[in-house]
Amino acid sequence: MIANYHTHTFRCHHADGTEREYIERAIEGGIRIMGFSDHIAFRFPDGYESDYRVHTSEVEDYFKTLRSLRDEYKNEIEIHIGWEMEYYPLYFDKMLENAVSWGSEYLILGQHFIGNEHPHGKYIGEGINGEKELAEYVDCVLEAIKTNKFTYICHPDVVLYTGDKAVYERENRRLCKAAAKADIPLEINFLGIRDHRHYPNDDFWRIAGEEGCTAVFGFDAHRAEAAFDGGSLSEAGRIVEKYGLKLAGTVSLKPLK
Ligand SMILES: [Zn+2]
Ligand SMILES: [Zn+2]
């Protein structure tokens, strides 16, 4: 594994360590291309800023620090600076406009909420059983794919769905068909493997394999040690093998303009 596009920094308030520690850990593990993709800063119209994101006041420092490290380490590793971002129908245009104005290189989709997150949204990683909610999640992912701005889809199986199996199957097949058609990679998320979360979900990856989807590995590092996570490689490899997924070792970053 030589590329990882999913790396956080302490600015999202649930990660720790310095960027330099992450970079050195990645180099040590043999990573040649490293993307920083912290949870994108966003101020909702009422002034609210989510605590799990970079605050808008920290954006300047995010770029300044990473650009300087990118130059310093340019002979050892190729560093890219982007964001992990949701697709919210109400706010996508503004969020993209911000990302462009900051000079971001790329976006990956990490759809953590439905209902535009704030003030009445729902976090989808902690258990939903309604057909409507699952469909809304899939609709957001489909709309995100259509924008052609997202380089890949992080943890597409992040929804903890406790409802009817047939519904899970139908909705995720809709997601996977669209991803395969648009040729957008789906991430096997190493944080899920490391932390024994409900994802990666074998039911999801079976469908992805049947639909001819491409997978990509993402460390989703929130600590320096995870900027190279060799310990999760065999489980990720098992999923690829078992479900006959295509695996993208590197991806081309989708331009934002
Ligand atoms: Zn995070
Ligand atoms: Zn992440």
Image: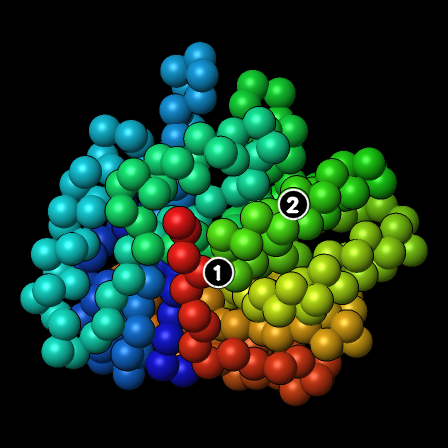
Q: Is residue 209 above or below residue 113?
A: below
**Which residue is rendered at x = 82% and y = 36% of the image?**
132
- Determine which quarter of the picture holds residue 43: top left
Label 2 SS = helix
The front one of 251 and 132 is 251
Q: Left or right of 38: which side holds 78?
A: left
The label number, if any, that marks residue 143 in the structure image: 2
Mark positioned earlier in the residue sequence (2 or 1): 2
The label number, if any, that marks residue 151 in the structure image: 1
The label number, if any, that marks residue 80 in the structure image: none
Q: Is residue 144 above or below residue 48?
A: below
* Image location (x, y in percent) of residue 92: 52, 35
Q: Is residue 226 above or below residue 139?
A: below
Q: Is residue 202 visible?
A: no
Question: What's the amino acid at mark 1?
Answer: Thr
Q: Left or right of 241: which side holds 131?
A: right
**Which residue is rendered at x = 80% and y = 47% of the image?**
162
Label 1 SS = strand
Q: Is residue 100 above or below residue 20?
A: above
**Which residue is rendered at x = 52% and y = 49% of the image?**
110
The number of discs equals: 2
* Image location (x, y in percent) of residue 223: 31, 57
**Which residue is rendered at x = 68% and y = 73% of the image?**
213
* Image location (x, y in percent) of residue 121: 62, 27
Question: What's the amino acid at mark 2?
Answer: Glu
- Determine which quarter of the picture holds residue 13: top left
- Mark 2: C-beta under 8 Å from nearest atom of ligand 2: no
